[in-house]
Image (tube, rainbow, N blue to C red):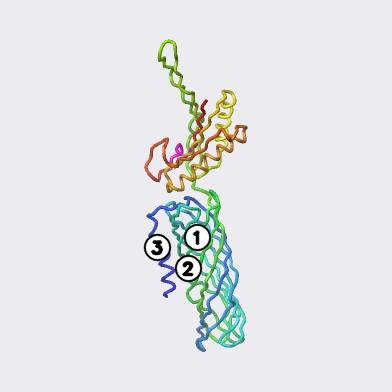
Amino acid sequence: MKKIFVSLAALAIAVAAGQARAEVAPGWYVAPGVALTFGENSTIHAPTGKTEARTENTNVGFLGAVGYAVGNGLRFEIEYLHDQHNLTEVGNTAAFGHISNNALLFNAYYDFKTGTIFTPYIGGGIGPDFVHLENYGVPGAQLNGDATVAAYQGIAGVSAQLDDNWSVTADYRYFGSFDPKVSYTGGGQARMSNASHNMVVGVRYSFGEEKAVQPLPPPLREVQAPAVKAAVPAQVAVAPVEENFTVFFDFDKSILTPEAKKVIAAAVAKIKSNGFARIVVTGHTDTVGTAEYNQKLSIRRANAVKAELTRLGIGASSITAQGVGENDLLVPTTEGIREAQNRRAEIVLGK
């Protein structure tokens, strides 16, 4: 019962911690993985008495999950886990057979922000385990059959974000279930303890959060040249001519959309026709996410625009790319608000 309490406590902590902010982008994800499992020695409770059983040291299992990241550090998912442990000894007698688990677990996690690509997390899960026992024991005293019991697990690990969508994960999981009870060849029924220590490595692909379709802002924003002001009849001071183009991005993305590429192509045409020699690209974000994460995202957006300008024939040495995160909002909002017009990069052209 102590191990069950620890696993459920991890689940409760993950749910309760959701008021803090974290850097995992909200939205749906899928997460397959492979587990190196170390089965705990089990205790068999049969009508003839209690005996200790030993299993192989290691085995390989696999799992897959579909989940949703809320955006405040919490993640929820449904996981399928399969593993199998082969029996080697009961008491001091060589034994055969195996036990396999097919568990459907409902997990909750909390991700801790670090300001780096690494995100530690804790979690826990509960759900049904469909247990199968086959010839588990010694001849004449074996467990056979299927049982559905409650399962639980406690989880601690870390993920490393590779780009906007992909991350790799590594964690430790303690998995266990209530004792499955099946037929006993010695007569009647018997039950046994069922638990394992699992080292899991996997990948996670995040799709990003669904967004309502919003009308695109005008693709070009031009700033008229300041009016010419005469200082004296013989001299005229003219302010430098600048033109602006604005590129918009999808939520939590730095990938250029087809509309964004059209805006950049228009800027390139203006550069080549008017001879602009100074080009400054400034990336921006909305207010969803931490300041550290948004600063990095704004730089990625600016660099994406610079790369497209360079691809279209503009010399990289004439382009300055910079990011300002969630500062200088086009549409002022409070923290945590998704605003399409703030997810942008501005191209400023100067003579």
Q: Do the CB atoms of the residues marked 3 and 2 lie less than 8 Å apart?
A: no
Q: Position of residue 271 (x, y in %)?
A: 57, 27
Q: Position of residue 318 (x, y in %)?
A: 56, 32
Residue linked to disc 2: 153
Q: Residues within 10 Å of mark 2 (few under 14, many from 20)?
A: many
Q: Nearer the viewer, mark 3 or mark 2?
A: 3
Region of the chain picked out in magenta, as a range:
339-344
Q: Nearer the viewer, mark 1 or mark 2?
A: 1
Q: Amino acid at mark 1?
A: Val
Q: Position of residue 99 (x, y in %)?
A: 57, 75
Q: Position of residue 32 (x, y in %)?
A: 57, 59
Q: Earlier in the sequence, mark 3 or mark 2?
A: 3
Q: Earlier in the sequence, mark 1 or mark 2?
A: 2
Residue linked to disc 3: 13
Residue linked to disc 1: 158
Q: Secondary structure at mark 3?
A: helix
Q: Secondary structure at mark 2?
A: strand
Alpha-carbon distance for marks 1 and 2? 17 Å
